[in-house]
Image (cartoon, rainbow, N blue to C red):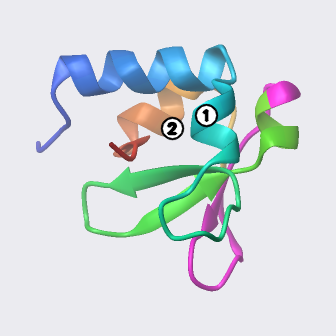
Amino acid sequence: MQSWREDQKALTRSIIRNVDVVAFCFSLTGINKGCTLDHLDGRFGYITLEDALADCFRVYDYESETLQETYATLEELIEDGWKVST
């Protein structure tokens, strides 16, 4: 099964657990929606700052802004193929 490298998973854990301000408040596209995520299948999503502060792991589609999935834990999110965009 395909997965991200361990250092990418560790960075994802750190950024989301610590609610890294830069990751949640800055976007290279100029349109900030939250912490941008990449999926193994090529999709892009994001977690809102509000959700991260509440330990709520909801992933929204970056383009349509629709809710894609809700995870009970950060580990479930990572195991399902998501990581923080770098």
Q: Nearer the viewer, residue 61 or 11?
A: 11
Up/down of 85 relative to 78, above or below? below
Residue 75: where, in percent of width, then height? 49, 23
Q: Nearer the viewer, residue 27 or 37?
A: 27
Residue drawn 54% across and 23% down?
Answer: 15
State left or right for residue 39 relative to residue 46.
Answer: left
Q: Nearer the viewer, residue 19 or 26?
A: 26
Q: What is the span of residues highlighted in magenta in the rendered image?
A: 53-69
Residue tagged 2: 77
Give the secondary structure at mark 2.
helix
Residue drawn 51% across and 38% down?
Answer: 77
Q: Amino acid at mark 2?
A: Leu
State left or right for residue 44 relative to residue 23.
Answer: left
Residue drawn 60% across and 56% down?
Answer: 46
Residue 78: where, in percent of width, then height? 42, 33
Q: Which mark is residue 22?
A: 1
